[in-house]
Image (cartoon, grey):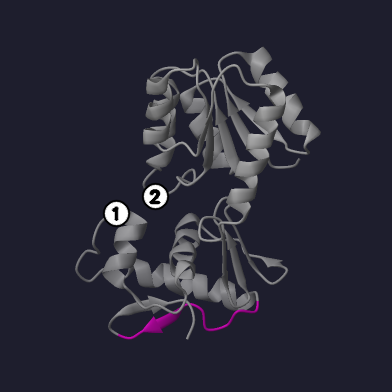
């Protein structure tokens, strides 16, 4: 089954299905969520590129946006997921709240179906053209941060969560040396305990998986400092 491109968060199932049908005309697959918890579960499990947020409780659409933008320590959905909010009414306060919470765009009533599809297309183009947000390239290694996939050439990598997060962090600046403390804060939100070798173990397993797929010597250990992805 094809992974969804778009997550639709809307309490009214009839409206959600109408929106999904309109997106399908543009070739976009959608998953549907009626509330916050279901939406966050789907954002984590199906890795959509874009979320359309309509009527949702508790807290409303702005709170939903804040929840997504905050991410989830140690994994889950991508906090840079594209977000288009449907304002419940043409209210300056509602629109400002959505943008301040982190929405990429806001659609206000009365909005025609064509306007919605054009805004979705525009936002999808912007996301596709933002490699720092989605696609990371380092030699033969390609990492899709939104779909949470990594490849070496045509070979897909089967990575554990920490291995994937480590690869993402290193691939953002592949020639930079990251200290162990930096990487531990990124991966576990805390500095490494004295004498801890957990990071080295994950880096060693990542190196073996990359090497088996044809990217030998990555990541590179910098003695006494940390790691960089390539030499």
Circle 1 — which element? loop
Residue 162, relative to residue 123: is it above or below? below
Tell me, for residue 74, which label it has, or none. 2
Residue at image position (45%, 24%) is 61
Furthest-left residue in view? 194
Query: Which image quarter is the N terminus in?
Result: top right
Is residue 123 visible to us here?
yes
For residue 182, what is the image quadrant?
bottom left
Residue 165, relative to residue 210: is it above or below? above
* Place of residue 162 in the rendered image (x, y in percent of width and height, measured from the top left): 44, 58
Mark toward the start of the polypeptide (2 vs 1): 2
* Place of residue 81 in the rendered image (x, y in percent of width and height, measured from the top left): 52, 43
Q: Which residue is mark 1?
A: 189
* Place of residue 76 in the rendered image (x, y in percent of width and height, measured from the top left): 47, 44
Residue 221 included in the magenta stretch of the image: yes
Residue 132, relative to residue 19: is it above or below? below
Q: Within 10 angstroms of label 2, few (less than 14), some, or many (20 or more) residues?
A: few
* Place of residue 210 in the rendered image (x, y in percent of width and height, measured from the top left): 58, 74
Is residue 48 visible to us here?
no
Q: Which residues are magenta?
A: 214-223
């Amino acid at each position: 089954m094809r992974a969804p491109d778009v997550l639709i968060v809307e309490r009214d199932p009839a409206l959600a299905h109408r929106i999904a049908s309109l997106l399908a005309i543009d070739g976009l697959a959608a998953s549907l969520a009626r509330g916050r918890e279901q939406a966050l579960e789907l954002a984590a499990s199906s890795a959509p590129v874009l979320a359309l947020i309509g009527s949702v409780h508790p807290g409303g659409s702005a709170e939903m946006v804040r929840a997504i933008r905050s991410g989830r320590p140690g994994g889950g959905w991508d906090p840079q997921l594209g977000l288009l909010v449907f304002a419940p009414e043409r209210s300056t306060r509602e629109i400002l709240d959505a943008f301040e919470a982190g929405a990429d765009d806001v659609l206000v009533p009365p909005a025609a179906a064509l306007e919605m599809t054009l805004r979705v297309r525009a936002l999808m183009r912007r996301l596709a053209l933002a490699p720092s947000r989605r696609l990371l390239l380092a030699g033969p290694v390609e990492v899709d941060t939104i779909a949470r996939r990594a490849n070496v050439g045509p070979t897909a990598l089967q990575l554990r969560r920490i291995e994937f997060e480590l690869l993402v962090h290193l691939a953002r600046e592949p020639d930079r040396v990251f200290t162990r403390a930096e990487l531990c804060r990124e991966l576990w939100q805390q500095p490494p305990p004295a004498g801890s070798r957990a990071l080295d173990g994950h880096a060693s397993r990542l190196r073996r998986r990359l090497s088996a797929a044809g990217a030998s010597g990555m990541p590179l250990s910098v003695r006494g400092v940390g790691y960089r992805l390539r030499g």
